[in-house]
Image (tube, grey):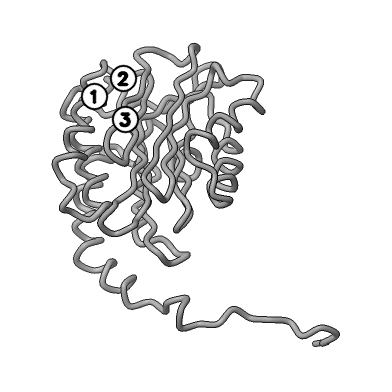
Amino acid sequence: MSLCLFITFRGSTLTFSIVAYCQRTGQVGVAAATAVQAVGKLACHAVANVGAIASQALTNPYLAYDGLRLLERGISAEEALELVLKTDAQADKRQVGVVDNHGRTAAWTGSEAIPWAGHIGGRHCSIQGNRLAGPQVLDRALQSMLATEHLDLAERLTLALLAGDEAGGDTKGERSVNVLVFSTEEYALCDIRIDDHGAPMEELRRLFRVYQEKILPNVLGLPKRADIPRPSVQQGSRH
């Protein structure tokens, strides 16, 4: 059984996604899976110390771009979502999940999202999807998120995607998966991208092990912003 469907259907895109904040570490992240290529480019958006947004159904990336700018100004997830939806003439065709860097969440499922469509909120996380086998997909993913709060956020998101898959998901299958997490640095702590694969959920299991064993230690050793001053340009200077 597959977790979700993200496929062009008269302009619509179908997705299962999770946005979450870790109170223990301050990390923010978003994870999603789709039936076509490159879900990370289309649906998953996050900024360190700001928040994360999934934009799906009839996808409008500007809901995420503008929403993150609002979160950066200190506006709550709920307020940011309300403001960006007001700018969208096709809001009934959108689906959006938002989490800010205080763990506040908000979600929207437009009335024209392809059924089964819906969203569910939990402690510091929101899970949303359309064209799913039913609400049990979201329920199982939420159960996983709540049961794994002792783990790092990247692992929690990975396990939640797999749990949704085991709950039935969508019979159309997937082609791509993304697990994107930011800690306090401007670069991603985790960015597992499977852009085109016949069995991306199994590939996710494999790549997450590679990430834990080989990639994460290297990322943790990268330079930190606190040790690197931002460049400044002296007034009137020339090169």
Q: Nearer the viewer, mark 3 or mark 2?
A: 3
The numbered mark, 1 or 3, whose residue comes first in the sequence reads 3
The kind of residue on which mark 1 rests is Val
Quadrant of the rendering where the N terminus is positioned: top left
Rounded to the nearest angstrom, the CA distance separating label 3 from label 2 is 17 Å
- Between circles 1 and 3, the one closer to the viewer is 3
Tag 1–tag 3 contact (CB < 8 Å): no
Residue assigned mark 1: 137
Query: Please, what secondary structure does the residue beneath circle 3 have?
Result: strand
Q: Which residue is mark 3?
A: 121
Label 1: few (<14), some (14–19) or many (≥20) C-alpha neighbours in 10 Å: many
N-terminal of the pair, mark 2 or mark 1, is 2
Q: Going from the N terminus, do you reach mark 3 or mark 2 first?
A: 3
Q: 59 above or below 160? A: above
Estimate how packed mark 2 is, as few (under 14), some (14 to 19) or many (20 or more) residues with alpha carbons within 10 Å.
Answer: many
- Asked which secondary structure carries label 2, the reply is loop
Image quarter where the C terminus lies is bottom right
**Picture quarter containing residue 39?**
top left
Residue 127 in the figure: left or right of residue 48: left
Q: Quick one: 181 or 149, which is closer to the camera? A: 149
The x, y position of residue 203, in whole percent, is 24, 46
> Toward which corner of the image does residue 202 lie, by quadrant?
top left
The quarter of the picture where residue 16 lies is top left
Tell me what residue is drawn at x 40 percent, y 37 percent. 105
Front-lying residue, 92 or 132: 92
> Disc 1 to disc 3, how far (Cα)?
13 Å
- Please say if 67 is above or below 173: below
Q: Amino acid at mark 2?
A: Leu
* Residue receiving disc 2: 132
x and y percent of residue 58 in the render? 53, 24
